[in-house]
Amino acid sequence: MLKDIIKSVEHLSKIPQKDDPQVTDRTFFIDASHQGLTAIPSEILALKELEEVHLENNQIEEIPQDIQHLKNIKVLYLDKNNLRSLCPELGALSSLEGLDLSYNPILPSSLPVVSCLRTLRELRLHQTGLEEIPIVICKNLHHVELFGLTGNHLKFLPKEIVNQTKLREIYLKRNQFDVFPKELCVLRNLEIIDLDENKLNFIPEEIGNLTRLQKFFVAYNNLSFLPESLRQCSRMSVLDLSHNVLQYIPDSLSELARMTEIGLSGNPLEKVPRLICRWPSLHLLYLSNTGLRRLRRCLPRLLELRFLDLSRNRLGRCPSQLCALKNLEILALDDNKIGQLPSELGSLSKLKILGLTGNEFCSFPEEVFSLASLEKLYIGQDQGCKLTYVPENIGKLQSLKELYIENNHLEYLPVALGSMPNLEVLDCRHNLLKQLPDAICHTQALKELLLEDNLLTRLPENLDSLVNIKVLTLMDNPMSEPPEEVCAEGNEAIWKYLKEKRTKKIMATKIQAWWRGTMVRKGLGEFEDLLKVRKKGKSSPKDKKGHKAPKGKPGKRNK
């Protein structure tokens, strides 16, 4: 197996050496990830010119001593294995710049060997069970630019972390920090800080020292206010404050002129912060579940906005000012109280994804049909009013790829679905569908057809012509054609049943045509006349026991 791995990457890693009298092939890169390896093969360790090795997603249990022979290696990925200890020889890799040991049950006592890797620039120790960072690593490694520590049990950082003066990115998501580690505020080269999903109550004023900070993630904490000094992080472009307890955002943050993405979802704001309209370069705006009842009139100033999430609020209508956001590509209005869409909706000519699930539409909002670029439409009604039909005008959405109309009261689907050449996903679960239109067999791009919990008894006989279908769900339907036991066996069994039924139907038609021709050729009359005679013969007066009724006594009739 290893020979196949090496062979498959050789064409990417052979570099002719012009200085050599005889040009030779040398392997610099190898990918042996996802191979089920339990040990690092000796053949890999023998490739002394290797510079990058991928061994992630295996079951490797130890690093052999011979790892020291890979003197030129610069990148080594060993994440998602079963490593418990690190051999001392690992520290001999004097050229190593990138090391990933994430998702391994490494014993803390074996980690100090990493401190010998003085050239290391990227160190990833995500989800390794760390409760504290070995001090010796922070003391000895002075060139680290990326430090990944997500998903551990850290409560603090060692004060020696200040030695990481070149640190640009640090990832501390899903740890146990109660207090923002002030040591980070000394590392002036920091560009990315990720402290999502901790227990932070505040951010210190010293955060303003990080004038190069570009991306700051502190979602899912307990922040109730923000420091004014945050405005000094003049290069900030991404700020995620989602799911905290913030009631307002300081107006001073409007000085962050480079903002392109702001996450405020899950905070009890109740109003759209005024300063948002002062960020004209904003591309992504998350305002889900913030208690909004209306939007600000200045919102159309965000001419560069691509993504807007207003789901799970209390909006009673869809404001027409949204239609001025000409560059909008994704709009989420799910779980509000909207009953009608503005007639100008078609001006969102670049809109590709629209979420309307869980609103109060009494009928299908036909304003949607003017969105020529729409690719995904979500209008399943898990709460509120239920839709009873989908108009035939749905066929105008020729770019549509995914249609989600689950949890409604639909009894039938529009024939126009068959004229939608790009439709790949159709979700009709939990409706009242009794049958599918035969036209659905023309949606050749369809890959997923979700039909569970309806009233279907049969499928269109040519449904197996949908050769791209990978997912077909029919649970909780009173199916008879195909029978439920056939449906339970999956797509192949369903397709086989439909083909066999269609073959039998074709054969029956051929036999009937042959019989008609035979009757005519033999001069026995037209086929239809023979049928009349046959029916007349069936109506002879007989009682239930099969005997003729006696003369003068009429047979018993049904009351």
Image: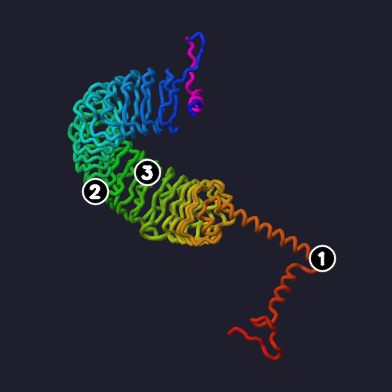
In terms of image quadrants, where is residue 39? top left
Q: CA distance from mark 2 to mark 1?
A: 88 Å
Using the image as rendered, state which of residue 488 and residue 382 is in the foreground.
488
Check contact, mark 2 vs mark 3: CB within 8 A.
no
158 vs 146, nearest the viewer: 158
In the image, residue 258 lies at what x, y percent?
30, 33
Q: Is residue 504 above or below residue 287?
A: below
Residue labelled with disc 3: 325
Judge whether residue 298 can be spotted in this image: yes
- What amino acid is labelled 3 in the image? Leu
Give the Cα distance between marks 3 and 1.
77 Å
Dot 2 crowding, Cα within 10 Å, few <14, some 14–19, many 20+: some
Task: Point out the stretch of residues depicted in magenta.
Answer: 4-19
Question: Which residue shows up at 76% across the image and 68% down it?
Answer: 526
Percent coordinates x, y for residue 449 in the rendering = 49, 51
Amino acid at the residue labelled 2: Pro
Q: Secondary structure at mark 1?
A: loop
Which colour scheme appears in the figure?
rainbow
Pinpoint residue 500: horizontal percent, then vertical percent: 62, 55
Secondary element type, mark 3: loop
Q: Is residue 152 left or right of residue 27?
A: left
Nearest to N terminus: mark 3 or mark 1? 3
The kind of secondary structure the magenta stretch mainly shows is: helix
What amino acid does circle 1 point to? Answer: Lys
- Residue 257 visible in the displayed image: no
How packed is label 1: few (under 14 Cα within 10 Å), some, or many (20 or more)? few
Instruction: Point out the tag, 2 or 1, that comes first from the N-terminus.
Output: 2
From the image, tell me which residue sits under label 1. 522
Q: Which residue is mark 2?
A: 268
